[in-house]
Amino acid sequence: MGIFKRHHHWWIDYTKDGLRKRRKIGKDKKQAQKILDKIRYETTENKFQTTLPEIPRIKFADFCDEYLELHSKINNRAWRGFDLNNIKVFKKHFPGKYLDDITPFIVEEFKAKRIQEVSPATVNRNLATLKAIYNKAIFWGRYSGINPVKRVKFFRENNKRLRFLEKSEIVTLLDNCVDYLKPIVIIAINTGMRKREILDLKWTDIDFQRRIIFLHNTKNGETREVPMNQNAINALLSVDKHKNSAFIFINGKNGKTYYNIRKCFLTALEKSAIKDFRFHDLRHTCASHLVMNGIDLNTVRELLGHKSLEMTLRYSHLSQNHKRKAVEILGQNVTKMTPSDQEEDAVSETIDAQVIEVNKVR
């Protein structure tokens, strides 16, 4: 008798009536050992039971709440805008369902219905969260079946969207921002920081003397130093400090940060007649203007905090004019290295004279 692991699952190996038996238990090693110990005891006492303890059925909505409390709130800073929103969608589509009620076919039905309402990228985020929920249910020993999202194909996404503001649009947008939104937008355009990175800023993260913003909790989990230009510095200095809060951008008198600025940002866009634009596109605006002003892509990558250059290459087409200038500079230098017509004539005359002298000697 014993336990062993195969394909991320624990199995029990025992003998009954002279026959070797193997049963898959799940991803919880302790549960597998507990069941095996019980079988050993009952075999010794001649009370072997053919049925194994069953995992009680759990309602899908109840486990989603467990997932939020024990996983999302602890490990995901953006749990409100991501996991919570996705779970609200699940509860609406799977009312009254238990974990073992949701099959791959039901997930496919959800996928087909959801694509009529939102973009492929949003559906994929829904499916990714649903898959993560079931993975945790299996890992925690709350569900013993197969993950129903495992064999569901995700949509192919187009991640090449690039929307940025022209200089005139930037001016118009800033003119239509309410007082508390304006410095947030200025910092986004002048640093390329993400929305959550800006809204979570504390005064202790700012070094005005060295003109640097220190980011400790970034999307990729790494710390980052963001240089500030004078526009960003002036925007920060325009914000009044709250006596009871360390955060820079606070919502009201309670000293808490803004959870969402979507409504006021959409209002500013509408007043500015700017369409098809998101707050995240301010990050694209920053990067696009850097490239168009001749900044190399690797420097842009470092400023934006991209882990690889692949993400930054989406801006490469904006540098065509600068590539042409570089080739022109190369052409000018090559021309300087090429002999002029007069120099070529002089060299030819010298060679001809040397040939004549040689013939005379012969």
Image (cartoon, rainbow, N blue to C red):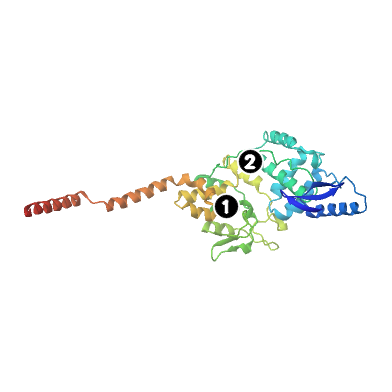
Q: Which residue is drawn at 71% across and 54% down?
A: 75
Compared across the picture, whether 158 is left or right of 108 comes to left
Q: Which of 194 and 19 is in front in this view?
A: 19
Question: Residue 88 lies in what quarter of the image?
Answer: top right
What residue is pinned by disc 2? 121
Closer to the eye: label 2 or 1: 2
> Residue 119 is drawn in which quadrant?
top right
**Which residue is label 1 attached to?**
188
Element class at badge 1: helix
Q: Earlier in the sequence, mark 2 or mark 1?
A: 2
- Name the kind of residue labelled 2 in the image: Ala
Q: Which of 315 and 137 is in front in this view?
A: 137
Q: Do the residues labelled 2 and 1 touch (CB within 8 Å)?
A: no
How packed mark 2 is, by other alpha carbons closer than 10 Å (few <14, some 14-19, many 20 or more), is some
Left or right: 243 as drawn, with respect to 159: right
Q: Where is residue 216 in the image (x, y as percent from the top left)?
A: 63, 60
Q: Is residue 5 left or right of residue 19?
A: left
The answer to whether 250 appears left or right of 310 in the picture is right
Residue 45 lies, in percent from the top left, at 93, 53
Q: Which residue lies furthest to the bottom in this view?
A: 209
Q: Which mark is drawn over residue 154? A: none
Of 31 and 320, the residue lying toward us: 31
Q: Position of residue 36 (x, y in %)?
A: 84, 52
Residue type at numbered disc 1 = Ala
